[in-house]
């Protein structure tokens, strides 16, 4: 063959550094366990389960890290916008963001501290009268057992008597002291470590995303990017937008109950607004407002016992704010939904609350939404193809 007719040179390829895949024609008895797809899937599943169990067992260490990571994720769009708009270094932007949050928190506490303190002190002062009235009413309906009446009477006469069993012995006293010191140390560490973790994660957040993207196979990057985009839409829609709805709802509840004369209107309104973070839980504020209004009217110097002022107006105030939240704020602010039925949401809340308590209630819905997205994008299609092929 002449040089003119010589075949073109094959392109140079990089040497194969990874181990070639196993030969599918290789007999089953000659394969290693890790060469079987089912065994590899089980190993991956077991690794994820063991990792989740380890994180749960060490949740006292990982909770501040997890909270700081979530806060860095929520604040990253604002930090990125500020960094690009004013061309500030990212560490300076993050530092100014932390200072702004601290200043806003201190200003809010300084401004609303006297109001909160006054309502808390009033509630503590009137609680014995509320308990006395409730004991009297229950005694009229049906006699309480002697132990319950004795407990209520001792509590009214000496509230500190409830804590006497904790100090019955020296060992128990030291045990309580150790618990109190432990709680104090945990709170101090959380206050100190949370801004530190947040600063680190917020500073390197985009770099961490880029590093994680390099470990995704090229053939899977489009699918993984689509899944992560859906997760980001769902999670950010729950946290950023739901937090704003909770803040506005809390202010509306507090204002409405202050207008209708509900006692402790600020504590009750802000608390009910915070409860809107968890679906269907904020309804607790309604009967609680009616009960406090009724008890306060009985213990007031000039009682107003009409059902209009006790039941009607506080209920109308709650229902109006509930209507505004459900039909105005949520469609306007929270356009992105978890796309789960009411029954599924209730089950998810029970599971999350049972596993993680308050944090479980807060993070149960976005975590369930992410799991649902992974199942829809990666698991169900393969399962349907397997069902069709077999």
Image (spheres, rainbow, N blue to C red):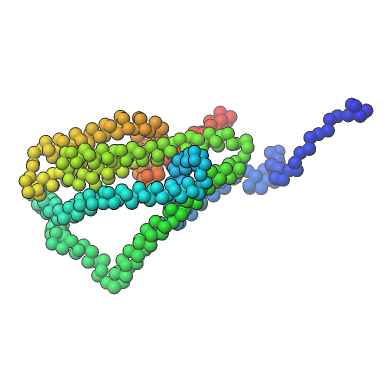
Front in this rendered view, residue 20 or 88: 88
Visible residue check, residue 375 = no
Q: Quadrant of residue 323?
A: top left
**Left or right, 141 with reference to 367:** left
User: For the point 66% across and 48% down, which residue is it?
Assistant: 32
Location of the N terminus by quadrant is top right
| Residue 64, horizontal then vertical, whole percent | 43, 53
Q: Residue furthest bottom?
A: 170
User: For the point 13% across and 44% down, which residue is it?
Assistant: 294
| Residue 220, horizontal then vertical, whole percent | 60, 36
Location of the C terminus by quadrant is top right
User: For the point 8% across and 42% down, which residue is it?
Assistant: 304
Q: Residue furthest top?
A: 5
| Residue 183, horizontal then vertical, whole percent | 35, 61
Front in this rendered view, residue 271 or 144: 271
**Left or right, 148 with reference to 337:** left
Q: Residue furthest left?
A: 302
Residue 47 lies, with reference to residue 377, above or below; the image says below
Front in this rendered view, residue 100 or 23: 100
Residue 196 lies, with reference to residue 168, above or below; the image says above
Visible residue check, residue 204 = yes
**Left or right, 96 with reference to 243:** right
Front in this rendered view, residue 281 or 312: 312
Q: Quadrant of residue 341?
A: top left
| Residue 203, horizontal then vertical, whole percent | 51, 48
């Amino acid at each position: 063959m002449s040089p003119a007719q010589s075949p073109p040179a094959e392109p140079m390829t990089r040497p194969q550094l990874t181990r070639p895949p196993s030969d599918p024609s290789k007999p089953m008895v000659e394969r290693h366990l890790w060469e079987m797809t089912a065994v590899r899937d089980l190993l991956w599943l077991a690794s994820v389960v063991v990792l989740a169990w380890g994180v749960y067992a060490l949740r006292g260490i990982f909770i501040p890290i997890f909270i700081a990571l979530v806060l860095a994720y929520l604040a990253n769009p604002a930090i990125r916008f500020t960094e690009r708009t004013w061309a500030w270094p990212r560490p300076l932007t993050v530092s100014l963001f932390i200072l702004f949050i601290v200043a806003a928190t201190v200003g809010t506490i300084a401004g609303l501290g006297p109001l909160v303190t006054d309502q808390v002190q009033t509630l503590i002062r009137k609680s014995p009268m509320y308990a006395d009235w409730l004991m009297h009413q229950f005694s009229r309906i049906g006699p309480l057992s002697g132990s319950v009446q004795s407990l209520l009477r001792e509590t009214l006469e000496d509230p500190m008597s409830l804590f006497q069993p904790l100090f019955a012995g020296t060992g128990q006293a030291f045990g309580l002291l150790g618990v109190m010191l432990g709680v104090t140390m945990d709170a101090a560490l959380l206050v100190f470590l949370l801004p530190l973790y947040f600063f680190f994660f917020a500073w390197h957040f985009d770099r961490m995303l880029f590093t994680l993207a390099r470990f995704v196979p090229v053939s899977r990057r489009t699918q993984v990017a689509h899944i992560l985009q859906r997760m980001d839409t769902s999670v950010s829609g729950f946290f950023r937008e739901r937090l704003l709805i909770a803040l506005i709802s809390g202010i509306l509840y507090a204002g409405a109950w202050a207008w209708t004369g509900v006692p402790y209107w600020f504590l009750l309104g802000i608390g009910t607004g915070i409860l809107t973070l968890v679906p269907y839980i904020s309804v607790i504020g309604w009967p609680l407002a009616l009960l406090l209004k009724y008890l306060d009217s009985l213990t007031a110097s000039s009682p107003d016992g009409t059902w209009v002022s006790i039941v009607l107006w506080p209920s109308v105030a709650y229902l109006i704010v509930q209507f505004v939240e459900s039909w105005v704020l949520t469609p306007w602010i929270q356009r992105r939904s978890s796309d789960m039925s009411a029954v599924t949401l209730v089950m998810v809340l029970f599971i999350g609350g049972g596993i993680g308590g308050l944090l479980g209630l807060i993070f149960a819905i976005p975590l369930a939404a992410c799991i649902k997205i992974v199942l829809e994008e990666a698991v169900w299609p393969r399962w349907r193809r397997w069902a069709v092929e077999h």
